[in-house]
Every structure is written in C-alpha cells, then in structure tokens.
Amino acid sequence: MKVLLLTALGALFFAYYWDDNFDPASLQGARVLLTGAGAGVGEELAYHYARLGSHLVLTAYTEALLQKVVGNCRKLGAPKVFYIAADMASPEAPEHVVQFALDKLGGLDYLVLNHVGSAPAGTRARSAQATRGLLQVNLLSYVQLTSRALPSLTDSKGSLVVVSSLLGRVPTSFSAPYSAAKFALDGFFGSLRRELNVQDVDVAITMCVLGLGDRAPATEGASRGPRRPRGPGGAPPGTRTETPPRGWLQPEIEPSAQKRKTRKNRQHLDLVSAVAVSAARCAR
C-alpha cells in the first residue's frame, strides 16, 4: 500500500512540474535580446523568435552576417528587428548592447546568451593571455549582460536563457581556457538561480548544455577578406557550432521552482534543442 501511495505521489509531482503546455502565442510581442545571432544556433533561434512574432535585438561580431539575419527575420514576420554589431572581448560592449536593446524595445522579456569565443590562432592553450580573453567573452560578458538586464527582466517577470557547453561539465584535452570559462558559467548561473529563488524574484533561468560538433556553419562560407581567428569547429568568433548529444541538452530546474518557471525552462529547452539540430544539419 505504501509503495502504491508513493508511486501515485511521485506521478502527481512529475505531472505538476513537467506538464508542457507551450503556447506559441506567449512569445508574440515578447522583447528578446539574443547574442551570437550571426550564424549557427543563434541564427536559427532568431528565425524561430521571428516566426513567433517576437520583437528582436540581435547582436554578433560580424555586421554583414547580422544584416542578412535581420532581413530574413523581417521576411518571417518579426514586427521589430534591430541589430548591433559588438565584440564581447571588449569590456564596454555588454553594457552598451543591453542599453541599446532597452532603448529600442523599452524593456526586456527574454535575454538569450548564446555567443562564444575562442583563443586566437597560435596562442598557447594554457597561456594567461588566452585564458583572460576567453574568460571575458565566455564568462565575464555573460555576467555583465545579465547584471545590466536583470532589473528589466525582474520588472517583466522574464526569462534568462544560457546556451552553454558540454565542456562546462566534462573537460577534455586542449580546451583548458574554454572549459574553465564554461565550468565557471555553470557555477555562476546555478548560484544566481538559487539567489533569485531565495529573494522571490520571478525570473526563470534555463541552462542549455550543448555537446560538441566539428562542423563550421555554412552561413559565412569562404572569406573574401583577411582571415579572422576561427572558433571551435572552424567557425567565426561568436558562432556556436556545438550540437546536442542524447541526454545532454537539459534544463537546470530546482525541485522547489514555481511551475511557471519550470514550464518556461522546458519551452526554451525544446526551442534550443530544435534549433541546434537544425543548425547542425545546415552546416553539413
């Protein structure tokens, strides 16, 4: 009898927290700031938000790629689309980007952090220079963007979506600075989630962990100008080429989280999973 009772309680708990009733209309008119939007997963995310009728501010390293993505988003039905080219290796860029988004959209409902950086070609993997640069792009810029956007997200009871990497969970050879930044990213947002819960701040945080891919996105193709340093998988700086292996794309959800936050986490998990697979297919 006790076993049956516990099983029933477990089933009710699971149904309560994992019931997924995603309504596409919930993103219609939503104000979204998306980083790393020039190619790969970020580009596909921009197109999905555009189809759902969201207002967008897109940012990436390469302005030409952003202009193309903005044009496509408008064709897909996005009511408002703005872009700002920014190099997240610059400590001043994150605050400038968020302020631009607040000025254009009047506030934020979603902050989607997807950009990624790598050490310049020829830099020693374990050098302080490489580690410092990667920490700025892959960690400190995330912290700066979050810090600047959090008051607006708090007002709107919004969502923070962080697209991270398997290398932030499982280290591998020849990725020391990158892996260190991703481990720190996981720790920072895991701690922030608990702080917001304790303070009863209604902002959902979704961590999406992508696996590794060795394909460069087909978006940029061959460069006609001077070759820029390449990121993981041969992609331009700021482009994410990782793809979700089975079982590794998952939301980080506290058992005590509110059901609304849980649903929002699940919705963004599904969205990022779909676009990651789509971007990987396009890169083949």
Image (cartoon, rainbow, N blue to C red):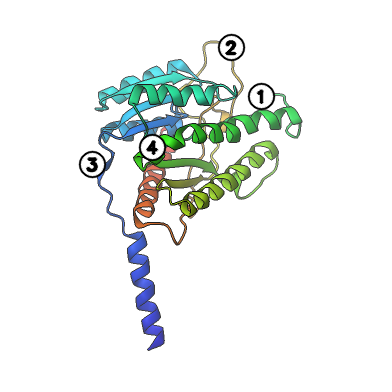
Q: Are marks 1 and 2 in contact (CB under 8 Å)?
A: no
Q: Which residue is mark 4?
A: 110
At 45% from the left edge and 47% from the top edge, which residue is drawn? 206
Q: Is residue 23 visible?
A: yes
Q: Which residue is mark 2?
A: 226
Q: Please name which of the two marks, 2 or 3, marks the residue nearer to the observer.
A: 3
Report how far apart the C-alphas of labels 3 and 1 lie in the structure.
Answer: 42 Å
User: Residue 33 lies in what quarter of the image?
Assistant: top left
Q: Which residue is mark 3?
A: 25
Report how far apart the C-alphas of labels 2 and 3 lie in the structure.
Answer: 44 Å
Whichever of callouts 4 and 3 sits on the residue coming sooner in the sequence is 3
Whichever of callouts 2 and 3 sits on the residue coming sooner in the sequence is 3
Report how far apart the C-alphas of labels 1 and 4 lie in the structure.
Answer: 31 Å
Whichever of callouts 1 and 4 sits on the residue coming sooner in the sequence is 4
Q: Please name which of the two marks, 4 or 3, marks the residue nearer to the observer.
A: 4
**Secondary element type, mark 1:** loop
At 59% from the left edge and 18% from the top edge, which residue is drawn? 228
Q: Are marks 4 and 3 in contact (CB under 8 Å)?
A: no
Q: Amino acid at mark 3?
A: Ala
Q: Residue furthest front?
A: 199
Q: Are marks 1 and 4 in contact (CB under 8 Å)?
A: no
Whichever of callouts 1 and 2 sits on the residue coming sooner in the sequence is 1
Report how far apart the C-alphas of labels 4 and 3 lie in the structure.
Answer: 15 Å
Q: Is residue 119 above or below residue 193?
A: above
Whichever of callouts 3 and 1 sits on the residue coming sooner in the sequence is 3
Q: Which mark is residue 120?
A: 1
**Secondary element type, mark 2:** loop
Q: Is residue 127 above or below residue 20?
A: above
Q: Is residue 219 visible?
A: no
Q: Amino acid at mark 1?
A: Pro
Q: Please name which of the two marks, 4 or 2, marks the residue nearer to the observer.
A: 4
